């Protein structure tokens, strides 16, 4: 069995998701390269030691630079907060390691381009964590678009709605600090929508955006992870430096038009990640909470039975369906990460770049930044000018 030795940096939400993917992969995809869970790295020795045991890593370390230097590591998987992606990815590439990096790729377009240059100069493989591409219903939507079964595409509308910071006393976690996160709901949630649009519809040429930060100051946290935090230091507050919500309109190079909404203030929506595509021959609707199902409408259905119908995408519809359960047995969020890891392993075996890779990460960053320019300038921005 061919193996690839992994060193993973970050052990919270995404670290857990990626670890789980590496653990499950050999059981369900036995013919693929086997990801060897060598070393996990994090800042807090006690917590990272616990994570190593819980997730199944052979060793742990608190020093990512030492990890990258090791000869017995082939691939660095970056799940740390966004402000350290660039330095780690560039160092890893220079050391000849393949790099898998969570989204958004970087804090800025410039940084993401430097990361792409580094992996290309080093000739290593690179992947970015746009895991929703691998949900069964998304894979089916992609197939229908690519086979022309929706006809000419007119509309793409997408929304990613959460509500975990609706309480004004929710602390100022790193995701609410620009210098660490780059942006707020825009880069965290909007990045997924932009990637989905690129994947399903094509290049975005022009954007016009608006954003809002509803709660401008929050209590300083005493202990935080990505989405949770405890306590606050004596009632002291700090400024929220990212957007709570960002919306934008877009034109695609192929003539389609789009609307995008990313917010953490959609009361009642825990994590609604959806899109709708309308074409000349039909439409599809995706809702992540029902990621095994796609709502499908075809104009050439007989008039008396026309309407959206629910198609279960677990069987004939998606790439890895034969590997999982018998017909009609659904899969979940964690499988989007397993599928991402499978694509990475397949790419390594076939000596090609995995998809989505840093090119997709940079393209997404370009749109993120174009929207920010548009908000600042209060006008439409041509994405290709950036
Ligand atoms: C938090 O808002 C988050 O976990 C994002 O960081 C993920 O990328 C998204 O998949 C779900 O929400």
Image (tube, rainbow, N blue to C red):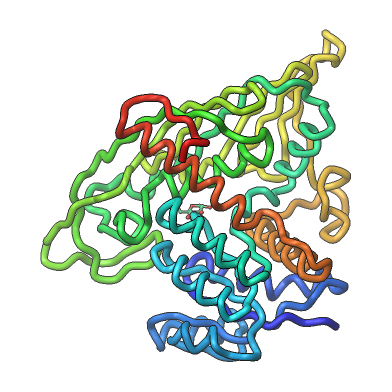
Image quadrant in which the N terminus is located: bottom right
Residue 11 can be seen, yes or no:
no
Residue 172 can be seen, yes or no:
yes
Q: Residue at x 62, y 72 (%)?
A: 122
Give percent across and percent down for residue 164: 38, 49
Q: In terms of image quadrants, where is residue 173?
A: bottom left
Q: Is residue 311 left or right of residue 133?
A: right
Q: In terms of image quadrants, where is residue 215?
A: top left
Q: Is residue 35 left or right of residue 257?
A: right
In front: 226, or 84?
84
Q: Residue at x 36, y 57 (%)?
A: 175
Q: In terms of image quadrants, where is residue 200?
A: top right
Question: Is residue 161 shown above or below 3?
Answer: above
In front: 179, or 12?
179
Give percent across and percent down for residue 80: 46, 69
Q: Residue at x 46, y 34 (%)?
A: 261
> Residue at the top extreme?
303
Question: Is residue 309 shown above or below 220?
Answer: above
Q: Give the number of marks.
A: 0
Give percent across and percent down for residue 255: 64, 21
């Amino acid at each position: 069995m061919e193996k690839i030795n992994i060193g993973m940096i970050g052990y919270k939400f995404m670290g857990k998701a990626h670890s789980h993917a590496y653990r499950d992969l050999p059981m369900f995809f036995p013919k693929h390269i086997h990801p060897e869970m060598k070393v996990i790295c994090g800042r807090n020795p006690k917590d990272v030691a616990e994570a190593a045991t819980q997730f199944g890593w052979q060793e742990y370390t608190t020093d990512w630079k030492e990890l990258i230097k090791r000869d017995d590591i082939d691939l660095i998987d970056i799940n740390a907060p966004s402000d350290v992606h660039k330095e780690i990815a560039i160092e890893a590439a220079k050391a000849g390691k393949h790099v898998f990096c969570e989204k958004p790729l970087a804090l800025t377009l410039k940084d993401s381009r430097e990361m792409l240059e580094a992996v290309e100069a080093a000739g290593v493989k690179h992947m970015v964590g746009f895991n929703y591409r691998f949900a069964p219903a998304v894979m089916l939507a992609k197939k229908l678009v690519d086979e022309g079964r929706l006809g000419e595409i007119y509309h793409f509308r997408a929304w990613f709605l959460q509500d975990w910071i609706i309480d004004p006393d929710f602390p100022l976690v790193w995701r609410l600090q620009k210098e660490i996160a780059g942006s707020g709901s825009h880069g965290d949630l909007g990045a997924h929508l932009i990637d989905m649009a690129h994947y399903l519809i094509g290049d975005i040429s022009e954007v016009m955006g608006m954003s809002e930060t509803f709660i401008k100051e929050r209590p300083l946290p005493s202990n935080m992870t990505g989405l949770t935090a405890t306590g606050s230091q004596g009632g002291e507050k700090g400024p929220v430096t990212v957007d709570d919500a960002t919306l934008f309109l877009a034109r695609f190079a192929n003539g389609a038009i789009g609307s995008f909404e990313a917010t953490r203030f959609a009361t009642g929506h825990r994590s609604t990640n959806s899109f709708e595509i309308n074409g000349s021959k039909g439409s599809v609707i995706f809702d992540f909470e029902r990621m095994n199902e796609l709502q499908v409408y075809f104009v050439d259905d007989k008039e008396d039975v026309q309407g959206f119908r629910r198609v279960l995408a677990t069987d004939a519809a998606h790439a890895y369906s034969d590997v999982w359960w018998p017909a009609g047995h659904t899969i979940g969020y964690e499988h989007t990460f397993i599928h991402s890891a499978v694509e990475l392993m397949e790419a390594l075996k076939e000596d090609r770049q995995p998809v989505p890779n840093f090119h997709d990460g940079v393209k997404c960053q370009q749109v993120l930044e174009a929207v920010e320019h548009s908000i600042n300038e209060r006008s439409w921005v041509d994405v290709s000018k950036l």
